[in-house]
Every structure is written in structure tokens, then in C-alpha cells.
Image (tube, grey):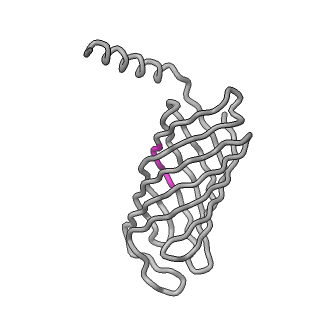
Amino acid sequence: MKKYIGAVLMALIFSSAAQASYVSYDLSGSAGSRDGESYSEIHLGLNYFPVNWFNWRNSIFTQFGSQINTVYGLDTAGLFNYEMYNSSRTLGIELYAGPGLRFASENSNAAFGVAGITFGLGGLRIGGGVQQFQYFEDRKDKNDFTLNKSETQYFITLSGGGSF
């Protein structure tokens, strides 16, 4: 039994190593709420897939809303992916989860964890998820109220992109 498990693990490792890595890009918009205040975010992302199940995602973003200070910066994350697509990649589903860091203005540097689901329809991606932030510094909103150092954001996303 141990030899069988070892052979299966080795086959998985070699099949992952044989897969070609690729880079993709996307432009996405999302909406959500935090501390009872709604916000919108726009991301321009660059995704590096060294293997098909892992994505090193880097995205520049801006977050804005009527009661929050506008924040901009860079999100970087290591995301574990599982996807099921048809052969032409026009229809499918993706699941992802992983940790990351946010380097941002307005004292909004944070560590985060994110998980979500995305449905692919042609070149369009529609999805949603949850992101848990732990901020390193105190932050304030436009009314000078102190915001929590820990927050959970629920979001919906509409995106499009390509690969090269």
C-alpha cells in the first residue's frame, strides 16, 4: 500500500512539473461592504501560474466609496486554484483560496485571506467571495471614526482578461 501511495504522489509531482506555466491578466470591478459602509474596487491583475493549481496574483487597485477614504495600492497573494473548463475554455468554474498582503495608502496595509468562486462564460468572469483583512495600523473613515483592525469583506466580481 505504501508503494502504491508513493507511486501516485510521484506521478502527481511529475505531472505538475511537466505542465507549462503561463501568465494571464484581468481587469475586474467589485462591490461590497465593510463596517456597514459600501465600497467599490477596481483591480488590474497579473496572474502567474507556475502550475495549473497555483496562482501568484499581483494586482494594483483602488477602493472608493461615499463614506470611506479612497485607498489605492498593490495586493499580492498565493492562491490555490481548482478549475473545470470545457476544451475551448468558454464555459467553466474556478474555485480559489489563499493568503496575501496588501500594500496600500491611508494606513491600509494588511495581511489577508481570500476565498471565492468564479464562473467563466466566454471571455467574461462572474463570481464572488469573502476576504478577511487584518490591518497593521489604525485607520479612519471620512467622518474621522476609527475603523476595526480586523474586517471581513464580501464581494461580487465582474472581470475579463486574457493570457500570454
Identity of the residue drawn at 66% across and 33% down: 164
Q: Residue furthest front?
A: 1
Percent across and percent down for residue 54 are 48, 36
Q: Is residue 1 left or right of residue 146?
A: left
Q: Quadrant of the N terminus?
A: top left
Residue 30, quarter of picture: bottom right
Identity of the residue drawn at 49% across and 34% down: 53
**Does residue 56 belong to the magenta stretch?**
no
From this view, report whether residue 55 is shown above or below residue 38: above
Residue 2, quarter of picture: top left
Residue 64, quarter of picture: bottom right
Percent across and percent down for residue 41 are 61, 63
Percent across and percent down for residue 146 are 42, 81
**Does residue 76 belong to the magenta stretch?**
yes
Identity of the residue drawn at 57% across and 52% down: 59
Q: Residue furthest left?
A: 2
Percent across and percent down for residue 132 are 43, 60
Residues shaded magenta? 75-79
From this view, report whether residue 74 is shown above or below residue 151: above
From this view, report whether residue 86 is shown above or below residue 74: above
